[in-house]
């Protein structure tokens, strides 16, 4: 470092000066810099280009179909994509996708935070490693296995819970009985919550574990109990991390396909609209996956791509919000 | 309010490692006792066992007894949370809660005790900040974050937070080591004022500071690295600094080691 500085300055002052000694060694370093900088820059550009191209592809493919659409794309529940006068809209898909994901968040965030607190604060030391590993292994279970397990086994566990809620709270439109016995929105949400639990837990655990000892001790020295210490020191410190963890998990829940496709029970055309979480319905991803065989004309394909575009924008927004929160966190910790 | 502390045959462990061996000393009420000694001699460890913060560290445990006006702090049915409400602590690095305002930092301990009444909180916050000689500097920005204050102000904020719950003893673990000389002087003046109401135990590496603020000085040393720290001698500060009973104390105070 110190040896190269004077010669660098000399070189920039007099460009055509003869090359200083030890050129070989320095040029090797330069070449390494060049390759690394090029590779890094190339990867960065590649990622941005990929996302942009996917966006452009979706828009370009969707527009012709959208122009032919006889129904209102954002508010219609119909889905007839063939023929000269196609009528399709995403209202039902958006409702199912978003409400199932919100249910997933409502379960996964509190449980995930509680598990993370247990692992970082309450669990005896010998249990911390294994407990964390077990949770992480939930993330390693393939999506399709979740789907199989949900349909064949877990369904019968959740059924009684659904029945109970419908009996007790059926008066509220959100919990009104519908008679759908297969994959209700509620059930999709519950399964999704298990699938995103590792994301929430792992990220929360990370940020809770980073709570400075001085903050924890400050609370304890004031006579805080463990829970009070968590409330005054750990949670305020970890809150931005928990929020971004929830956002990342939400992005995952919105786009989850295989497991959900296994579970959903599609509604017959013309089924009356219901706000009930115990209704059936398809998500964006499951509608597209279920109809992959229909992609035989540009118009049909375009309709599905338009639905995919909405999902893309939705998850993009959620991830963007997560990034912004993470950035705020970085600025805050300075 | 202030109480005396009797330490008897105190052994402090980290797991199987004996960090401090056989400490017996008395800290009189309403006085300042300085713990001095070279790094690793266990003075901070002894301090942290006085409010049972030592056991927060993994494997931390003690043997022997510590009594606060006769009440055994390590009795089996004694709740460490209760001990820490009686024995407050100020740390080496100022550690106000970063997400809380100045006001909320001072009120934190009271809120933990379930005090919700705004008038009470307002009163205690003002009293505590005045007690920590910080009130005039922050009274117009009580709602601003505590982390925005200077290091010396933050440390006084931490002292205000500690005295807000009216502890009987105040422990200070090198409270000035991260501060500039002016802030150090402010804290030292504050310590002298606080001893009228509190029993204070302070760990310091600064001989002059020990000489300036303390009534009693305890010198800790360790025979060799890896050996447990021991209390070499304890006595009135004037005696320890002018006429110590042990050669090692004299050597340390005069800067010949440590």
Image (cartoon, coloured by chain):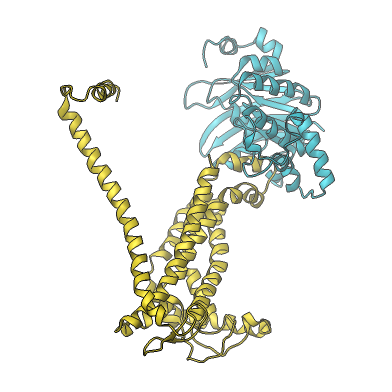
User: Could one spot residue B243 in this view of the protein?
Assistant: no
B107 in relation to A182, above or below: above
Query: In the drawing, does residue A20 fall left or right of residue B9?
Result: left
Decide which of B207, B50 is in the foreground and name it: B207
> From the viewer's perspective, is residue A183 above or below residue B119?
below
Evaluate whether residue A11 shows in this view: yes
* Chain identifier, colour yellow: A
Report the quarter where the N terminus of chain B lies: top right
Location of residue A215 (image quadrant): top right
Looking at the image, residue A227 lies above or below residue B198:
below
Q: Position of residue B176 (x, y in %)?
A: 63, 24
Residue occupying the far front of the picture: A67
The answer to which of B223 and B53 lies nearer the viewer is B53
Of all chains in the rendering, the one displayed in cyan is: B
What x and y, as percent, mark residue B103?
73, 41
Q: Quadrant of residue A148?
A: bottom left
Image-quadrant location for residue B167: top right
Q: Which percent across, then down, holds residue B133?
A: 75, 27
Residue that appears at 62% across and 50% down: A230
Q: Along the horizontal axis of the image, is B6 left or right of B37? A: right
Write the residue at 46% across / 60% down.
A319
Residue A327 place in picture, x, y as percent: 49, 49
Taking the view exactly as shown, the residue that stands out farthest to the top is B242
What residue is rendered at 48% in x and 51% in y? A206
Which of B13/B207 is in front? B207
Q: Residue at x 18, y 22 (%)?
A: A17
> Which residue is more in the foreground, B52 or B77?
B52
């Amino acid at each position: 470092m110190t040896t190269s500085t004077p010669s660098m300055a000399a070189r920039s002052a007099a460009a055509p000066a003869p090359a200083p000694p030890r050129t070989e060694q320095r040029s090797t370093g330069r070449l390494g810099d060049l390759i690394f900088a090029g590779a890094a820059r190339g990867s960065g550009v590649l990622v941005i280009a990929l996302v942009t191209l996917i966006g452009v592809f979706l828009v370009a493919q969707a527009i012709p179909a959208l122009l032919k659409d006889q129904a209102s794309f954002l508010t219609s529940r119909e889905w007839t994509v063939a023929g000269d006068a196609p009528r399709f809209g995403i209202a039902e898909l958006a409702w199912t996708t978003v409400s199932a994901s919100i249910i997933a968040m409502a379960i996964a965030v509190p449980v995930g935070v509680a598990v993370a607190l247990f692992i970082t604060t309450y669990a005896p030391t010998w249990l911390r490693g294994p407990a964390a590993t077990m949770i992480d292994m939930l993330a390693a279970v393939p999506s399709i296995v979740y789907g199989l397990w949900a349909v064949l086994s877990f369904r019968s566990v959740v059924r009684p819970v659904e029945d109970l809620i419908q009996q007790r709270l059926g008066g509220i439109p959100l919990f009104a009985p519908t008679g759908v016995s297969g994959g209700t929105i509620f059930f999709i949400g519950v399964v999704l919550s298990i699938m995103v639990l590792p994301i929430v837990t792992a990220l929360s655990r990370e940020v809770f574990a980073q709570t400075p000892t001085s903050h924890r001790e400050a609370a304890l020295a004031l006579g805080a109990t463990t829970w009070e210490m968590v409330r005054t020191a750990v949670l305020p410190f970890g809150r931005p991390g928990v929020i971004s963890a929830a956002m990342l998990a939400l992005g995952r829940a919105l786009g989850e396909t295989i497991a959900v496709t296994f579970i959903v029970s599609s509604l017959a055309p013309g089924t009356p609209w219901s706000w009930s979480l115990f209704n059936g319905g398809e998500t964006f991803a499951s509608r597209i996956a279920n109809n992959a065989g229909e992609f035989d004309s540009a118009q049909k394909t375009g309709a599905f791509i338009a639905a995919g575009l909405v999902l893309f924008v939705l998850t993009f927004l959620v991830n963007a919000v997560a990034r912004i929160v993470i950035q705020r966190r970085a600025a805050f910790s300075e | 309010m202030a109480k005396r502390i009797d330490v008897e045959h105190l052994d402090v462990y980290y797991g199987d490692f004996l960090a401090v061996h056989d400490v017996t000393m008395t800290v009189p009420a309403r006085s300042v006792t300085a713990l001095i000694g070279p790094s690793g001699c266990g003075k901070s460890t002894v301090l942290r066992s006085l409010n049972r913060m030592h056991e927060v560290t993994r494997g931390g445990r003690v043997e022997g007894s510590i009594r606060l006006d006769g009440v055994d702090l390590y009795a089996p049915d004694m709740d460490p949370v209760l001990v820490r409400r009686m024995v407050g602590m100020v740390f080496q690095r100022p550690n106000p809660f970063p997400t809380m305002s100045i006001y909320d930092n001072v009120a934190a301990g009271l809120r933990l005790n379930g005090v919700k009444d705004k008038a009470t909180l307002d009163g205690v916050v003002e009293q505590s900040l005045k007690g920590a000689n910080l009130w005039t500097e922050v009274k117009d920005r009580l709602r601003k974050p505590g982390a925005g204050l200077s290091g010396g102000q933050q440390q006084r904020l931490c002292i205000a937070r500690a005295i807000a719950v009216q502890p009987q003893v105040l422990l200070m673990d090198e409270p000035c080591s991260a501060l500039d000389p002016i802030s150090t002087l402010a804290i030292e003046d504050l310590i002298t004022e606080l001893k009228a109401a509190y029993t204070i135990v302070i760990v310091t590496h600064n001989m002059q500071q020990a000489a300036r603020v303390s009534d009693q000085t305890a010198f800790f040393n360790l025979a060799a690295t890896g050996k447990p720290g021991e209390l070499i001698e304890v006595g009135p500060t004037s005696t320890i600094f002018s006429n110590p009973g042990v050669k090692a104390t004299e050597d340390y105070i005069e800067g010949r080691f440590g």
